[in-house]
């Protein structure tokens, strides 16, 4: 069994590369190429040939930008997501060695997402001044510094770097959303967001696979030794540094005039104050108010699968000596769900736009509902709060069911996030930076609140909160999606009824 698992892990890099290859093949086969209506060519030149050459070259450059962006983020977040997954478990071990260290992983993550939430109001202003590439670099450096701080465990340093990271997180994610939208047009936004999500979440494979084997000798003890902790933190810091270096090679995406338009990204021309005012104005729009419930749900489920659930698995003594190793395996399977979901919906991006985003969100709702129920009957109620010998309805708890739930949590999260990226890029193409900042503001505020109450509430209460907001967030997403579809149908009907009027508008 152990040999087979290692063989599976070794195939992960090939699987990720195949995703990128398939996405690229999909792009050239099925993405509609622009016409030459706005391209001036000599009369003796075949316009179709010019169109194909021009379209392929420009789209190839844009897709290369998306791939480089994705792999850079994958490396940086291999470190951070792995750290978030094991943070509470590791900090308990540090406290056993150094009683003066009183840092709490849940509080640290709550600070990160709390500052992240507040900083999202000023992040568009920072991106407006620094531009996307420099903003992402600055954020990535702060992520790296946060990981490195665990090499010198001090309570004050942990909380200070958590606050600093919150600022960096707001900047890097606002810039990322804007950069991704710049690299996309109306037909490729779903595909590019899916490919980005799949490659980004493959980081859950690599970091957690490393943790799974690094914790191999810790089966008989609840404590993770100092030498193992230093090894893990050093490797994660090195991986983050490589991600920062890769980000240096990001290019400013070009623009072309074509029938299938690029999403026109315009950061405010009047600087930081204008960016802040635009964010406030957008936050009051009906679509954003409804989507904020969806954003809120993704925040609390993010905190659950990225920190609370893995800790609960590792704290369940009835799982036996493999409980601590299951923390890493849980992260791997969450990543597997994220990658498969992102790749699937990325490769089918064009069909998603055509057939609607609501079926995918409905699939995510069903996955999470099933996962919440199985967690409810499998893990003890007190497991998020510390090691416990308690039992739930399944006696003894099943490691297999626990790992299935990890996969469902990851796959469902991919369903929600890929479609949120798609609908925001489609509804607000001219305001990508402030819109993505508002998304991250709401999501991170929810995550901060969730991480805080995770240190106080038992598992079943947390699952009840998740299920309620899962329903509300899914329903409000459906309302926005249905309204968007109706607007498109109405616009198409008007165009068909009076094509001459449409022609006059276009000519003007």
Image: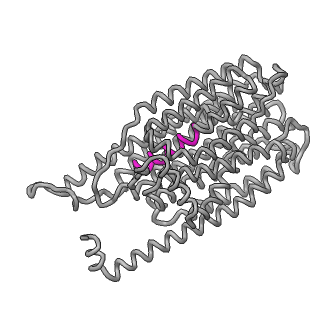
Q: In this view, does 43 lie above or below 235?
A: below
Percent coordinates x, y for residue 30 in the rendering: 37, 56
Q: Residue reaching furthest bottom?
A: 497
Look at the magenta stretch and give its main secondary structure.
helix
Image position of 430 (left or right of 239): left
Q: Decide if residue 435 is in sight here.
A: no
Residue 247 higher or lower than 128, as above or below: above
Could you tell me which residue is drawn at 65 percent across and 47 percent down? Answer: 444
Find residue 376 and report its horizontal and vertical position in percent: 81, 52
Picture quadrant of residue 145: top right
Magenta extent:
168-183
- Is 423 in front, or is 279? 279
Q: In the rendered image, which quarter is residue 363 located in? A: bottom right
Q: Which of 354 and 432 is in front in this view?
A: 432
* 207 and 483: which is toward the camera: 483
Residue at 24% across, 70% down: 507
Q: How many marks?
A: 0
Most extreme residue toward the left is: 44
Way the structure is coloured: one colour
* Residue 451 at x, y percent in the picture: 74, 44
Res. 481 visible in picture: yes
| Residue that appears at 71% across and 20% down | 228
Q: On the picture, is 174 further left or further right than 304?
A: left
Q: Quadrant of the N terminus?
A: top right
The image shows residue 399, relative to residue 477, as above or below, that is above
Q: Is residue 456 magenta?
A: no
């Amino acid at each position: 069994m152990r040999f087979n698992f290692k063989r599976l892990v070794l195939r992960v890099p090939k699987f990720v590369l195949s995703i990128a290859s398939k996405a690229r093949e999909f792009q050239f086969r099925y993405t509609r190429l622009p016409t030459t209506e706005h391209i001036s060519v000599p009369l003796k030149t075949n316009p179709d040939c010019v169109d194909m050459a021009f379209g392929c070259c420009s789209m190839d450059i844009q897709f290369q930008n998306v791939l480089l962006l994705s792999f850079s983020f994958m490396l940086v977040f291999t470190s951070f997501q792995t750290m978030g997954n094991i943070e509470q478990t590791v900090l308990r071990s540090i406290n056993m060695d150094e009683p003066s260290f009183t840092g709490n992983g849940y509080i640290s993550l709550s600070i990160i997402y709390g500052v992240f939430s507040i900083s999202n109001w000023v992040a568009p202003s920072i991106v407006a001044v620094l531009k996307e590439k420099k903003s992402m670099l600055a954020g990535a450096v702060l992520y790296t510094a946060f990981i490195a701080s665990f090499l010198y465990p001090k309570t004050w340093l942990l909380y200070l770097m958590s606050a600093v990271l919150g600022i960096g997180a707001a900047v890097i994610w606002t810039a990322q959303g804007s950069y991704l939208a710049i690299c996309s047009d109306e037909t490729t936004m779903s595909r590019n967001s899916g490919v980005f999500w799949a490659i980004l979440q493959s980081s859950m494979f690599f970091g957690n696979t490393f943790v799974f084997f690094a914790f191999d000798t810790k089966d008989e003890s609840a404590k993770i030794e100092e030498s193992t902790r230093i090894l893990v933190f050093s490797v994660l810091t090195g991986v983050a540094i490589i991600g920062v270096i890769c980000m240096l090679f990001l290019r400013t995406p070009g623009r072309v005039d074509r029938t299938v338009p690029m999403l026109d990204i315009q950061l405010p021309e009047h600087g930081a104050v204008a960016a802040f005012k635009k964010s406030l104005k957008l936050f009051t729009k009906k679509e954003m108010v409804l989507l904020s419930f969806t954003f809120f749900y993704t925040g609390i489920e993010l905190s659950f699968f990225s920190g609370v659930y893995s800790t609960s698995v590792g704290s369940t003594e009835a799982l036996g000596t493999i409980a601590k190793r299951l923390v890493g395996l849980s992260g791997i399977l969450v990543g597997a769900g994220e990658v498969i979901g992102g790749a699937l919906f990325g490769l089918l991006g064009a069909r998603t736009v055509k057939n609607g985003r609501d079926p995918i969100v409905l699939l995510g709702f069903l996955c999470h509902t099933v996962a919440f129920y199985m967690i409810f009957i499998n893990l003890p109620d007190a497991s998020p709060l510390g090691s416990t010998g308690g039992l739930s309805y399944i006696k003894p708890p099943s490691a297999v069911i626990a790992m299935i739930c990890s996969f469902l949590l990851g796959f469902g999260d991919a369903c929600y996030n890929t479609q949120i990226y798609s609908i925001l890029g489609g509804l607000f193409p001219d305001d990508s930076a402030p819109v993505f900042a508002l998304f991250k503001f709401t999501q991170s505020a929810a995550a901060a609140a969730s991480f805080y109450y995770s240190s106080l509430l038992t598992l079943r209460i947390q699952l009840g909160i998740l299920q309620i907001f899962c329903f509300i967030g899914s329903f409000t997403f459906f309302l926005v999606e249905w309204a968007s579809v109706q607007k498109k149908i109405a616009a198409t009907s008007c165009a068909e009824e009076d094509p001459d009027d449409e022609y006059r508008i276009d000519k003007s």
